[in-house]
Image (cartoon, grey):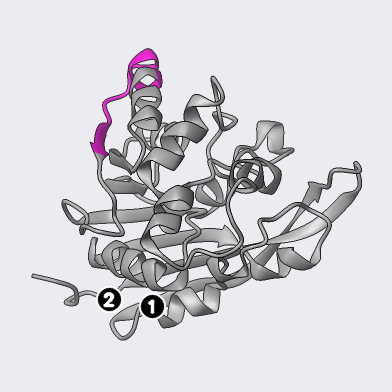
């Protein structure tokens, strides 16, 4: 599983951009129907190998949707699920959030911890697979950026993410919208791992206020250098007061 530290340098290209994201995933098979195949594509070893293949996998910039949706929030506790090399977690911590960053890859977490230390940021890093275990606490903000998994595993992940939000807290989930498969921007030939914001919202059930659920357009550059409009699936939801696990 993973994130896409979508980075925007001076409001230009995205960091864990579609192209960045799919470069790692194009090595995957088109279908993941058994445990061995799942681990080969989405497991811890697969992600460790992807990170080892490059000295730096993502841009080092925070995902633009995170910045847009969270910039005006009052800082509190935050969970960055699928933190990768830590750009989102670092951005949150620099703005006063008390951040826990989780990832399935120890290689990514080691890089994230080194960068946080260099920046003088106090961030808790946890090696955990949130498709198998619930989050270790409850938070004012739970952010998951570009976590693309098969539907059954994704349902477990989204449930764990939602359970980790305190009453009155915010869940922010962002991904590549399925409509991107119809563009010239590279995407893995794995339609089962894509989801819409409405699908993510429907998985929450009662006790949530849906503040944003949309396919948000942005410009990207395809391999031939053409400007293409693609879409991010963006869900921002607030847990109603008096709801959630005890």
Position of the C terminus by quadrant: bottom left
The residue under label 1 is 209
The residue under label 2 is 240
Q: Residue at x 69, y 55 (%)?
A: 187
Dividing the picture into quadrants, the one containing residue 178 is bottom right
Side of 11 where 204 appears, left or right = left
Residues at circles 2 and 1 in contact by the CB criterion of under 8 Å:
yes
Dividing the picture into quadrants, the one containing residue 196 is bottom right
The secondary structure type at the circle numbered 2 is loop
Q: Residue at x 30, y 47 (%)?
A: 78
The secondary structure type at the circle numbered 1 is strand
> Is the residue 93 above or below the residue 42 in the image?
above
> Is the residue 172 above or below the residue 196 in the image?
above
Side of 223 where 115 appears, left or right = left
Q: Is residue 66 magenta?
A: no
Q: Residue at x 78, y 48 (%)?
A: 220
Q: Position of residue 139 (x, y in %)?
A: 24, 54
What segment is highlighted magenta in the picture?
Answer: 115-126
**Residue 182 in view of the camera:** yes
């Amino acid at each position: 599983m993973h994130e896409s530290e979508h980075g925007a340098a001076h409001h230009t290209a995205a960091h864990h951009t579609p192209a960045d994201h799919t470069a790692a995933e194009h090595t995957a098979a088109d279908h993941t129907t058994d445990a061995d195949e799942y681990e080969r594509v989405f497991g811890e070893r697969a992600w460790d190998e992807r990170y080892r293949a490059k000295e730096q996998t993502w841009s080092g910039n925070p995902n633009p949707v995170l910045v847009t949706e969270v910039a005006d929030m009052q800082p509190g506790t935050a969970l960055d699920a699928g933190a990768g090399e830590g750009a989102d977690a670092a951005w949150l911590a620099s703005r006063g959030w008390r951040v826990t960053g989780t990832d399935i890859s120890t290689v990514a977490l080691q890089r994230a911890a080194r960068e946080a230390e260099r920046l003088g940021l106090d961030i808790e890093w946890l090696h955990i697979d949130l498709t198998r275990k619930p989050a270790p606490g409850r938070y004012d903000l739970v952010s998951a950026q570009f976590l693309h998994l098969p539907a059954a595993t994704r349902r477990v992940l989204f449930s764990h993410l939602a359970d980790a939000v305190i009453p009155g807290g915010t869940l922010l989930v962002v991904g590549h919208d399925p409509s991107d498969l119809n563009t010239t921007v590279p995407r893995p030939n794995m339609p089962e791992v894509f989801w819409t914001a409405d699908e993510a919202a429907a998985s929450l059930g009662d006790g949530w206020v849906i503040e944003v659920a949309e396919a948000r357009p942005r410009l990207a550059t395809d391999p031939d250098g053409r400007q293409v409009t693609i879409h991010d699936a963006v869900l921002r939801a607030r847990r109603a007061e008096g709801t959630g696990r005890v």
